[in-house]
């Protein structure tokens, strides 16, 4: 037996070199795959493949490496171009042996394996089918195999004594189907009938299953012809309203009257009678909602009272069917109306919540802006008072009129001190002006600064007076590197107390022009912008000067 396995292994190797699928004649049977050039008895780890069982499919196995195998599946019967199903077993494995199986001759271009589906696997110790993890499954087109689609999956054998079975999906065998149909047939159910259509190519029985009412069709038609009811004819106005349902009964009525010889008159009369039934059912819509009686009872009562009108006939089965469909439509309409009402209420509630949320968001924005402005004003108000206390620690008694003004303003909810004249606030000494925090500027330059037009020029000139151009060109307002350049190095920030002096001086200037706190806060918020522009201008002029000097040097 071992010799036969080795011979078959060598035969498979020869077929692999040929690379043709035509040599696949049947399923492999206890086929041991041996490495190339190996002679001797199979060892543990030399896998044995088998597909000679019901629903099995594996035609050829090629040994690629110690860990990889190419698998060829057989096509469907009488359809050689369709190759999808596989089902085979593997045994004689080693514990913790890892392998990769490549099913190399798939015929489908699109497969669920691309969307996460995975092959099934079970073993003798674990008989329940399980899916291989989808992360170990790959479905792709391989140029080495005639550009066929290849499904590769990795697997690790964990028990040596187990026989492992792999399948495309859950197998359902022909024998299992026949057992199931035999059990149904033994129950002798009236609505189930099993017949044989013939035999397949492989001489297997082809079954025809019929699941229907136990009554015979001819008996059913005869009973329909005998059972009739009388209903009144209605005008053509009602027929137009019931146009859609009228078409429903035409085919059945024509089929029923096709056996009669005087077909034309009876067909027209039946057509009108069906239209009358449908129109009458729609008329009963309002009555069925208000009365507790069913539409059928109301219809029968109204039809009995109309004796002076011509009578018409309609099959009872058709009438009952129309009545049931009408009742179902009424019930569905009632459910739809309830769902619409519930949805409308939910939309109204959500609209109210969105409106309230929008109002809260706008109110929060206003409060944040107001809080930011109040903080700026308070800092500017408190800054001069602190500086004056440092320079003049002696308390000064206010004049009676000023004291009266303060007392009146203290009674209000918000207190804003009156603006102090600029020249009276700052100290003059030896041709210098003291701005606060030990900062002195030249008196003549200070007077020139007071006549400067615009907040931008005033702030820029004041910054040059306080820091100087040599300091400003090597500093930044915030000390944070710019985001415009990737390799920008942050520069040292300007002194915070000097920035507060600039803000205080600008505030005193603005306070002489307006008393609107909103305008004051808005103009003060641009101080950092003005100083940043001045620093950029200084750096630009320095670069231009360096370029001119380098140009002169090159000319020399």
Image: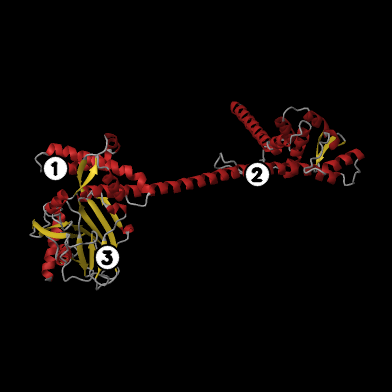
**526 lies above or below 140:** above
Camera-nearest label, 1 or 3: 1
Helix, strand or loop at mark 3: loop
Cβ atoms under marks 3 and 2 closer than 8 Å: no
**184 lies above or below 540:** below
Residue furthest front in the image: 308
Q: Few, some or many C-alpha atoms within 10 Å of disc 1 (few <14, some 14-19, many ≥20)?
A: some
As drawn, the label of residue 368 is: 2
Q: How much space separates mark 2 and mark 1, taking CA atoms?
A: 84 Å
- Tell me if 23 is positioned left or right of 170 in this view: left
In front here: 329 or 108?
329
In front here: 349 or 197?
349
Q: Which residue is mark 3?
A: 129
Q: Is residue 81 visible?
A: no
Of the 4 image quadrants, the one containing the C terminus is top right
Q: Which residue is mark 1?
A: 257
Helix, strand or loop at mark 1: helix
Cβ atoms under marks 2 and 1 closer than 8 Å: no
Count of labels in the image = 3
As drawn, the label of residue 537 is: none
In the rendered image, residue 169, in percent from the top left (x then y), is placed at 24, 59
Q: Mark 1 or mark 3, which has the lower sequence index?
A: 3
In the rendered image, residue 471, in percent from the top left (x then y), is placed at 70, 39
Quarter where residue 545 is shown: top right
Q: Mark 3 or mark 2, which has the lower sequence index?
A: 3
Q: Is residue 172 visible?
A: yes
């Amino acid at each position: 037996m071992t010799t036969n396995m080795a011979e078959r292994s060598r035969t498979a190797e020869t077929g692999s070199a040929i690379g043709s699928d035509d040599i696949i004649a049947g399923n492999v049977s206890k086929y041991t795959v041996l490495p190339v050039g190996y002679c001797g008895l199979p060892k543990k780890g030399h896998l044995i493949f088998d597909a000679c069982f019901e629903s099995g499919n594996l035609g050829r196995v090629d040994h690629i490496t110690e860990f990889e195998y190419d698998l060829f599946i057989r096509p469907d019967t009488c359809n050689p171009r369709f190759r999808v199903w596989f089902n085979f077993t593997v045994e004689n494995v080693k514990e913790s042996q890892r392998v990769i199986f490549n099913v190399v001759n798939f015929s489908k271009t699109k497969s669920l394996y691309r969307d996460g589906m995975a092959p099934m696997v079970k073993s003798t110790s674990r008989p329940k089918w399980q899916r291989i993890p989808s992360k170990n499954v790959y479905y792709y087109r391989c140029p080495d195999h005639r550009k066929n689609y290849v499904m590769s999956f990795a697997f690790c054998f964990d028990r040596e004594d187990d026989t492992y079975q792999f399948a495309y999906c859950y197998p359902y065998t022909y024998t299992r189907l026949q057992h199931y149909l035999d059990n149904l047939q033994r129950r002798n159910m009236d609505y189930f009938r099993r017949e044989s259509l013939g035999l397949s190519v492989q001489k297997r029985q082809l079954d025809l299953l019929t699941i229907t009412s136990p009554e015979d069709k001819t008996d059913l038609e005869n009973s329909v012809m005998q059972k009739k009811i009388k209903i009144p004819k209605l005008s053509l106005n009602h027929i137009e309203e019931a146009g859609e349902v009228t078409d429903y009964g035409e085919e059945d009525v024509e089929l029923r009257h096709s056996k009669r010889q005087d077909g034309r008159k009876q067909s027209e009369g039946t057509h009108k009678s069906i239209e009358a039934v449908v129109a009458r059912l729609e008329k009963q819509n309002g009555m069925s909602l208000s009365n507790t009686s069913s539409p059928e009872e109301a219809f029968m009562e109204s039809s009995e009272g109309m004796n002076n009108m011509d009578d018409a006939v309609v099959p009872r089965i058709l009438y009952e069917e129309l009545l049931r469909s009408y009742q179902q439509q009424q019930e569905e309409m009632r459910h739809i109306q309830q769902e619409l009402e519930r949805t409308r209420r939910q939309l109204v509630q959500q609209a109210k919540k969105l409106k309230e949320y929008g109002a809260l968001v706008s109110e929060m924005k206003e409060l944040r802006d107001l809080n930011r402005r109040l903080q700026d004003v308070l800092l500017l108000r408190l800054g001069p008072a602190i500086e004056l206390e440092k320079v003049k620690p002696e308390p000064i008694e206010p004049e009676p009129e000023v004291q009266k003004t303060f007392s009146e303003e203290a009674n209000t909810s918000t207190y804003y001190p009156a603006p102090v004249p600029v020249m009276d606030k700052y100290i003059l000494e030896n041709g210098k002006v003291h701005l606060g925090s030990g900062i002195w500027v030249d008196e003549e330059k200070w007077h020139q600064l007071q006549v400067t037009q615009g907040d931008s020029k005033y702030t820029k000139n004041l910054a040059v007076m306080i820091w100087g151009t040599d300091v400003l060109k090597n500093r930044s307002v915030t000390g944070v590197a710019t985001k415009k350049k990737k390799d920008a190095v942050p520069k040292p920030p300007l002194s915070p107390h000097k920035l507060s002096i600039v803000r205080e001086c600008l505030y005193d200037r603005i306070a002489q022009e307006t008393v609107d706190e909103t305008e004051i806060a808005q103009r003060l918020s641009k101080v950092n912008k003005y100083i940043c522009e001045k620093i950029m201008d200084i750096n630009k002029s320095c670069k231009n000067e360096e370029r001119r000097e380098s140009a002169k040097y090159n000319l020399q």
